[in-house]
């Protein structure tokens, strides 16, 4: 490496290191805002977060940083693999933000923070009208951000929504998703009808038995310990809408929500968020040194969280593993319930209103509904005031049920307070993990490992095959590297068909 390249590389890393300090502070404040911040303080705290985030953005706008970043990108072939990856990702980010001033960025951040606070208030009041003005601002902000972007020659962008989708799943387009979701509907709609017509009756009366917060906290602790969460580098608490935040290489925090009459909700939210945390805790340590630790896509991340939540957590072997402990912690729930009854109840198919509590089978429909509405919001400029009706109509169309209020309808998810394009990654993640689960089964006895609680073996395979290159490859390259095959929904659809045909004896 010549002296000029080294000088520019050192400058870039120095600025990124300073920006990371502001970013870390933002993560701490955001975590506080979504967990223990008093309601009246939320907007003020959001303003502080926006200010600090803007300081990081301003560093990226320094002339010397831009010149250095452009230089290392032009000479990326002379860099090491990880420095080259950093240079490419900085260039991609530059294409998106070149025409956005620090003043614009600050205003965008304040809009998103206000939207979060208004979403909280609207959900608590079950009144979409409280959130509607903010949602309109968020849409307008997203559209302005798209208009200001420079073209990325590596992307196929046909619509504004494609541009936003690329922020979460680089290289994936709405054409890809349309084909994927149409295939889901082709195979899942007829299968759902067969399941609903099945004579198999699954016992679920015990699923709504009362539990205490203390019991759910004890179960959450046990489940995180079981799957291999490192409590020396992580913690968990409660929030309105469960999430995971990787604050740093030694600080990953997960959250859940306790319902007194639905122990399974917190059970699976903690396994889901624990999956996210395992991804962050087990990524290569050098990723942080090269500032590429956040380059993995949301589809990659959701594939892992939903792998642990569903492919592991709802398996017969996992229920066999945890059944005695759940019965010990919550005797009033399982005292008259067999292991098989618990397994069946945790996998019952029942169209429902709330995405995060949806069964594994109907979950895909929840994502399709949101995807279709997002495209209408972004590409068709549908009136924001029409969204509750559109939402309710789609639930009736796809799942045969209709929300009774906005809280169980359009206000149930926090995601739109920060923009559009996230939701498809949940379904994409299911499809990724179905592909690599099939590969894992070829190389180890997954069922025995789960049954015996051998998560060292499972997490070891995931660390080497799934986590290691996630920040270094595009999603389509990554899944090809893991499985030797191109992305397809068929593995996931085959899995659902096999599992639920057996469960419902159809």
Image (cartoon, helix red, strand yellow):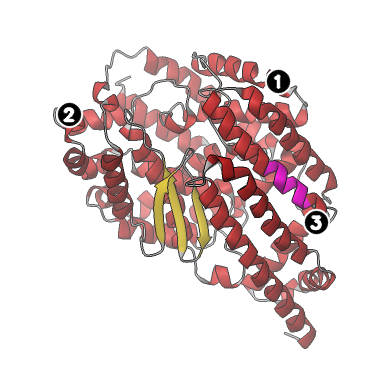
Q: Hey, which quadrant is residue 464 in on the image?
A: bottom left
Residue at x-position 36% and y-position 57%: 229
Q: Position of residue 457 (x, y in %)?
A: 32, 59
Few, some or many residues within 10 Å of mark 1 (<14, 14–19, 20+): some
Q: Is residue 338 left or right of residue 455?
A: left
Q: Which residue is mark 1?
A: 385
- Pick whichever, 74 or 266, lies toward us: 266
Q: How many marks?
A: 3
Q: Bounds of the magenta span?
A: 105-112
Residue marked by disc 2: 337
Q: Are marks 2 and 1 in contact (CB under 8 Å)?
A: no
Q: Where does the image place residue 260, in percent across and percent down from the top left?
A: 32, 31
Which circle's residue, 3 or 1, is located before the other in the chain? 3
**Secondary-structure class at tag 2:** loop
Dot 2 crowding, Cα within 10 Å, few <14, some 14–19, many 20+: some
* Pointer 3 residue: 102
Position of 184 with respect to 138 (left or right) is left
Q: Secondary structure at mark 3?
A: helix
- Identify the residue at horizontal 38%, vertical 44% (top origin): 270
Q: Position of residue 373 (x, y in %)?
A: 66, 26
Q: Find out whether residue 82 is within the magenta segment.
A: no
Can residue 225 be seen in the rendering of this structure?
yes
Q: Badge 3 local density, few (<14 within 10 Å), some, or many (20+)? A: some
Task: From the image, give the main secondary structure of the stretch colored magenta.
Answer: helix
């Amino acid at each position: 490496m010549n002296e000029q390249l080294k000088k520019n590389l050192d400058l870039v890393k120095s600025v990124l290191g300073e920006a990371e300090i502001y970013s870390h502070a933002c993560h701490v404040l955001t975590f506080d805002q979504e967990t223990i911040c008093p309601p009246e303080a939320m907007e003020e705290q959001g303003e502080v977060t926006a200010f600090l985030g803007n300081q990081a953005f301003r560093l990226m706008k320094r002339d010397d940083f831009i010149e250095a970043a452009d230089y290392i990108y032009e000479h990326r072939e002379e860099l090491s693999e990880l420095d080259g990856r950093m240079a490419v990702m900085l260039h991609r980010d530059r294409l998106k933000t070149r025409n956005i001033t620090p003043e614009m960025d600050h205003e965008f951040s304040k809009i998103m923070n206000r939207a979060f606070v208004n979403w909280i208030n609207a959900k608590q009041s079950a009144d979409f009208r409280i959130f509607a003005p903010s949602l309109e601002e968020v849409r307008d902000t997203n559209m302005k951000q798209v208009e200001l972007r420079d073209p990325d020659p590596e992307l196929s962008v046909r619509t504004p929504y494609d541009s936003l989708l690329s922020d979460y799943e680089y290289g994936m387009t709405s054409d890809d998703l349309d084909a994927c979701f149409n295939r889901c509907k082709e195979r899942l709609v007829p299968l759902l009808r067969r399941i609903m017509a099945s004579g198999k009756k699954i016992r679920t009366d015990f699923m709504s038995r009362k539990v205490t917060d203390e019991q759910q906290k004890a179960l959450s602790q046990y489940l995180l310990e079981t799957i291999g969460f490192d409590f020396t580098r992580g913690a968990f608490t409660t929030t309105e809408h469960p999430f995971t935040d990787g604050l740093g290489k030694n600080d990953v925090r997960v959250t859940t929500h306790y319902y007194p009459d639905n122990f399974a909700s917190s059970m699976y939210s903690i396994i889901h968020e624990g999956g996210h945390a395992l991804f962050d805790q087990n990524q290569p340590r050098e990723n942080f040194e090269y500032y590429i630790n956040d380059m993995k896509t949301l589809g990659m991340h959701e594939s892992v969280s939903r792998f642990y939540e569903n492919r592991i957590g709802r398996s017969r072997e996992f229920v066999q593993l945890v059944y005695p402990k759940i019965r010990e912690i919550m005797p009033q729930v399982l005292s008259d319930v067999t292991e098989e009854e618990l397994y069946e109840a945790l996998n019952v198919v029942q169209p429902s209103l709330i995405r995060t509590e949806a069964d594994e089978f109907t979950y895909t429909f929840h994502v399709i509904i949101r995807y279709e509405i997002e495209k209408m919001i972004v590409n068709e400029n549908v009136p924001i005031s029409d969204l509750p009706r559109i939402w309710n109509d789609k639930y009736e169309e796809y799942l045969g049920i209709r929300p009774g209020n906005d809280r169980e309808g359009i206000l149930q998810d926090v995601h739109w307070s920060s923009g559009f394009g996230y939701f498809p990654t949940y379904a994409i993640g299911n499809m990724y993990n179905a592909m690599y689960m099939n590969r894992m089964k070829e190389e180890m006895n997954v069922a025995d490992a789960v049954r015996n609680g051998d998560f060292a073996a499972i997490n070891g395979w995931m660390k080497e095959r799934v986590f290691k290159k996630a920040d270094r490859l595009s999603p389509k390259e990554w899944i090809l590297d893991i499985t030797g095959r191109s992305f397809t929904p068929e593995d996931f659809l085959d899995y659902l068909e096999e599992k639920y045909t057996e469960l419902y004896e159809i």
